Amino acid sequence: MILGCLASIFGCSSTAYQAKEEVYLFSYFTGNGEDGLHLAYSVDGYHFKALEEGEPILTPTAGGDKLMRDPCIIQDENGRFHMVWTVSWNEKGLGYAFSDDLVNWSAQEFIPVMEHEEGARNTWAPEVFYNKEDETFIIYWSTTIRGLYPETQSQEDDGYNHRQYYVTTKDFKEFSDTKLFYEPGFNVIDGTIQKIAGEYLLFVKDETKEPPRKNIRIARAEKPEGPYGPAGSPITGAYWAEGPTVAKVGDYWVVYFDKYMEKKMGAVMSSDLQNWTDISDRISFPPDSRHGTIFKVEKRFFDQLPFER
């Protein structure tokens, strides 16, 4: 594991020091996502510094609006990186590309996961999860379909009323039919899955605005595709949070998120996934960074990256 002793934060002793064998990377966007993919790195999981002096490392080409918002990157068991992202505010598909080195990327593709649905308004905040058990990728996202779930319909937030949907694939060439992924009984967006102790945890944003919630909650399932149970109590505080991403830092699970009304990142941590402490004042991220995904790479791989540090 990567992390050295976080003595200044948690008071751990020098005997707890671990070699820095991994580095945390953070894929993110700035502005409206028009300039492309940004990367930052951290050796301790708390302080992130931009690579390439904050310049984008990949320019968006997929979709009509050619945005690259909410970039989610995962690495499969063969070492290949797969990225999905939001290409538009109102198109019926998402972006996809892969890379073996985070430098050279495949041609960007538009995957029309909601084209079959006439009433679909959007395809937002896609993420991808690799299920090692059957070597299948699960791509999931949030969409508003006009007329569905009237019990949670509001005219606030431009009338968006999301539920989460998904497809599966083994090769990103052939895809399953689109299915409902999560219907928690509220307007839901920004899901991210973590497998922890044989259980699958889905961290989601409660997007309800009347009355305002805008917080992060956790649902649980026995399989990555669900079904997921009810979302628990909020793990974030009295501020609006979105775009959760999760990493294990030492003995703690840290959930990072975008405090988008305050234009900065925030975080909470827990050792038991039940009791959460806000550590927003202990983290740092590049200026103007918006939410994406935190993932780990081997330090020897990171050391070979040609990006400016």
Image (cartoon, grey):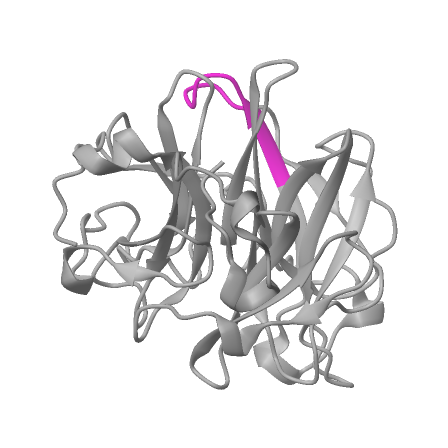
Q: For the magenta stretch, what is the residue range? A: 166-175
Q: Main structural element of the magenta stretch: helix, strand or loop?
A: loop
Residue 139 at least partly seen? yes
97 up-or-down from 120: above or below:
above
Horizontal relation, residue 183 to residue 110: left or right:
right
Q: Residue 40 location in percent, x, y?
A: 30, 55
Q: Which residue is drawn at 81% across and 44% down?
A: 220
Check residue 169 for magenta coloring. Answer: yes
Q: Which of the 4 image quarters holds residue 20? A: top left
Check residue 161 for magenta coloring. Answer: no
Across the whole image, how many numbered discs are drawn on residues? 0
Q: Which residue is drawn at 21% across and 33% down?
A: 105
Q: Which of the 4 image quarters holds residue 135? A: top right
Residue 243 at least partly seen? no
Of residues 305 and 164, the one nearer the viewer is 305
Horizontal relation, residue 158 to residue 288: left or right:
right
Q: Which of the 4 image quarters holds residue 106? A: top left
Q: Residue 180 location in percent, x, y?
A: 72, 41
Q: Residue 10 location in percent, x, y?
A: 60, 63
**Which quadrant holds the C terminus?**
bottom left
Q: Residue 77 location in percent, x, y?
A: 47, 18
Q: Residue at x 35, y 69 (%)?
A: 289
